[in-house]
Image (tube, helix red, strand yellow):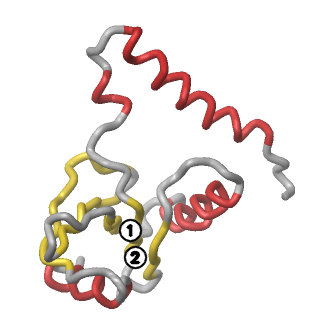
Amino acid sequence: MLTDPQLLELTATQLPGWPKAVRLDAILKGGSDRLYYRVQFENPAESGVILMVYTLARPDNPRFVPATRRLEKLGIHVPHIFAHDTENLCVWLEDLGHVDLHSFREQCWETRRPLYESTLKEAAKLHNVDAGA
């Protein structure tokens, strides 16, 4: 497992046009044997990158990047992939923010309904995809 300084150095290598990354903030909501970090840059106003570090323990992990790129190509809203290091098992993704659908779980239905509808509309796009394409 790479240390934070090593991950910051790797980030500089993989994102050469970006400002200097100075800190990684762990995102405690992980999943599928993956660790997520919000990349903090030298200029606090700069943001927009999540670093995902994965393992090969789960067979779906190496498929994440090709699947995400395919979904993006099909017009489905997914985080954009800025860089992928297959040797170090790291992916730099678009940061979609701190708020997710789960964070609205206690809100009234009138607030949640458009969020659920938007989510279902994105999922419905998958049903129009030709699996052979």
Q: Which mark is residue 89?
A: 2
Q: Is residue 71 above or below residue 126?
A: below
Q: Secondary structure at mark 1?
A: loop
- The residue under label 1 is 55
Tag 2 and tag 1, C-beta contact below 8 Å: yes
Name the residue: 32% across, 65% down: 49
Q: Secondary structure at mark 2?
A: loop
Quadrant in which the N terminus is drawn = bottom left
Disc 2 crowd, CA 10 A, few/some/many (<14, 14-19, 20+): some
How much space separates mark 2 and mark 1, taking CA atoms? 7 Å
Residue 128 at x, y = what percent? Answer: 80, 39
The quadrant holding residue 92 is bottom left
Name the residue: 49% across, 67% down: 81
Residue 132 at x, y = what percent? Answer: 86, 56
Q: Is residue 13 above or below residue 88?
A: below
Q: Is residue 30 above or below residue 89?
A: above
Residue 88 at x, y = what percent? Answer: 37, 82
Disc 1 residue type?
Answer: Thr
Mark nearer the N terminus (2 vs 1)? 1
Q: Which mark is residue 6?
A: none
Report the front residue among 87 and 107.
107
